[in-house]
Structures are given as C-alpha cells and as structure tokens.
C-alpha cells in the first residue's frame, strides 16, 4: 500500500497581511498592534490588555520582561538539551516559540481556553508545528489535573481572565498538581500581577512554599517596596534552584530586578495564608 502524501503545513500569513482591525475570538476581542519604529514587532492585545509580543523576524526574542526572566530561570536550572514544557495559558505563544528557537528539539504543549484564538495564532505567527508545539484547547487547571505524573521538565503558568489570575489555578491544590506532573528536578514558573500591599503575591508564595521544597521570587524592587503595580515571577522546584547563577544572570538585564529566596521570602510571605480549592473543588474560569 503506498504511503499517504505528506500534508503540507498551512501557509503563514505574511506580516503585511496581518489583520489591522479588531478580531472577535471565542472569549475576547483581539487586536494586533504594530510597534512604531519596530516593523517586525507585533503585540497581541486581548480586550485592551497586552497579552503577547512577538518579533516576526526573531523567534528567540522575548519582549516582555517577565518572559525573559522566565527564560533565564530555565537556562540556569536546565542549561542544556531539549525540554518537555507545558504552558498553562498560551495567547500568542511567545514563550514556547522562543524556547523552541533557543532549545531546538523541545516538545511543548500550550493550553488555551479560547478556541478561536488558538486557531488564529497558528495562522498569524510562525509557531513551531506539532509535535514540537501542540496547542490544546481547555481550562488550564482541568488539563493540568488530567496529565500523567512526572511527564514535564517545565510547567509555566501564565493564566489570566479579565486581567486577573483565576483563583482555581493559584491554590495549594493547583500547586500540588503541578508538582505531581513535574520530573524530580522539574521547574514550575508562575507569572502573576499584583497591587500594593501585594497580598495576592504573598498568598501565591504561601501556596508554593506549602508544596515545593525550593521557591524564589523575582520582581522589580519598586513592586516589592509597594510603590507600583506589576508582574511578579515565582519559581519552584523539588530540587535546589541555582540561586547564585540566576542572580548573576538577572543582574545583566537592562532593567533592575530583585531575587528573593530563603528566609527573606518567608518574611515576605509573613502570615498570609495560601488559598485552597473550595468545597466543590476547583472552579474554572468563566467562559465569556
């Protein structure tokens, strides 16, 4: 029996033909914003919030500071070889695209709750093809809970709904689920945003410290001093994290960030309790 003809990949949308008007997805309104003075840079905006930024000419480039910080944590903790990476929250898949460019041969799955958006970003951007990158439609927590033990080297949580991290992905039980699917030296990376006095960030630290043996935090010093709103990156692992090497790498970034771990992180957490699933279990993000 003759082999089936190989299916050709769908053609990419040329940069000049990317949509210039808002596009309605399953759950949001998406806009592709071109950056003045940077013709190859495209920012995906969902309901007015910047969600992903990709350089069409440079797959390894990461424009968002917290994503570059995540990449540095991965590089310090797992410096060589392909990775098995699970991304909870996909949007434009900027980080999976960059990891593929920096770590060829990696196998990645990105979970996106918005079915139409998942299809569109495949059409708009030069994302790695399956099986190097599969985009799975579903609720991040539900997919995480369904995965087998010890199946991922890296789990990235970058989940937002209407500008907030849904509660059901920031509980102790969600952290335990991430711990379960990671390899013995696997890495859990969490992106969140918070306002002073950073109560939510402290509760997220509590959830990770109650689950993982090793946890660290990376953020702009002004955020940690309670002077402004912004991103906070958390990294957790059952294995020791390369704090010294990561601190050196972070100091080379254009903008200053502070790494907090050990007793300083316990002091930051204070007495803020971790969140737990409610009596009915995890409550997924509203679909709409």
Image (cartoon, rainbow, N blue to C red):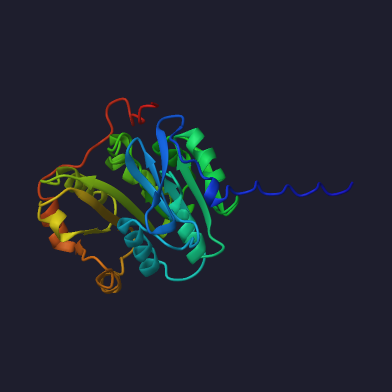
- Residue 257: give x, y in percent of width and height: 21, 64
Whether residue 176 sits left or right of residue 19 in the image: it is: left
**Does residue 144 sit above or below 24 in this rendering?**
below
Query: Total of numbered circles in the picture?
Result: 0
Between residue 98 and residue 239, name the one nearer to us.
98
**Does residue 176 sit above or below 76 in this rendering?**
above
Q: Dividing the image into 4 quarters, which one contains the C terminus?
A: top left
Between residue 267 and residue 116, name the one nearer to us.
116
User: Residue reaching furthest right?
Assistant: 1
- Residue 149: give x, y in percent of width and height: 46, 48
- Residue 66: give x, y in percent of width and height: 31, 56
Quarter assignment of residue 275: top left
Whether residue 166 sits left or right of residue 97 in the image: it is: left
On the question of residue 232 being in view, the answer is yes
On the question of residue 153 being in view, the answer is no
Whether residue 14 sits left or right of residue 147 in the image: it is: right
- Residue 17: give x, y in percent of width and height: 55, 46
Quarter assignment of residue 142: top left
Whether residue 282 sits left or right of residue 268 in the image: it is: right
Q: Residue at x 35, y 54 (%)?
A: 188
Q: Residue at x 30, y 50 (%)?
A: 191
Quarter assignment of residue 244: bottom left
Q: Residue at x 35, y 66 (%)?
A: 72
Q: Residue at x 24, y 52 (%)?
A: 232
Between residue 276 and residue 230, name the one nearer to us.
230
């Amino acid at each position: 029996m003759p082999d089936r003809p190989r299916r050709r990949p769908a053609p990419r949308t040329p940069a000049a033909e990317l949509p210039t008007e808002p596009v309605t997805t399953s759950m949001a309104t998406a806009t592709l914003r071109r950056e003045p003075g940077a013709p190859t840079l495209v920012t995906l905006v969902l309901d007015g919030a910047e969600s992903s930024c990709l350089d069409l000419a440079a797959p390894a480039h990461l424009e968002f500071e917290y994503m570059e910080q995540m990449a540095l944590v991965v590089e310090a903790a797992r410096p060589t070889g392909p990775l098995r990476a699970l991304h909870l929250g996909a949007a434009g898949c900027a980080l999976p695209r960059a990891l593929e460019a920096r770590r060829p041969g990696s196998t990645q799955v990105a979970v996106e709750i918005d079915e139409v958006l998942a299809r569109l970003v495949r059409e708009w951007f030069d994302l790695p093809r399956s099986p190097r990158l599969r985009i799975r439609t579903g609720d991040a927590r539900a997919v995480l809970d369904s995965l087998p033990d010890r199946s991922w080297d890296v789990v990235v949580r970058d989940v937002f709904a209407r500008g907030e991290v849904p509660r059901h992905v920031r509980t102790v039980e969600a952290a335990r689920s991430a711990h379960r699917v990671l390899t013995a030296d696997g890495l859990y990376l969490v992106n969140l945003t918070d306002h002073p006095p950073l109560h939510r960030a402290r509760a997220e630290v509590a959830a990770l410290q109650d689950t993982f043996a090793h946890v660290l935090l990376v953020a702009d010093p002004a955020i940690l001093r309670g002077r402004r709103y912004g991103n906070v990156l958390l990294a957790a692992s059952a294995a020791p994290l390369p704090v010294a090497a990561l601190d050196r790498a972070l100091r080379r970034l254009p903008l200053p960030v502070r790494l907090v771990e050990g007793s300083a992180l316990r002091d930051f957490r204070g007495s803020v309790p971790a969140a737990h699933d409610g009596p009915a279990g995890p409550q997924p993000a509203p679909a709409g």
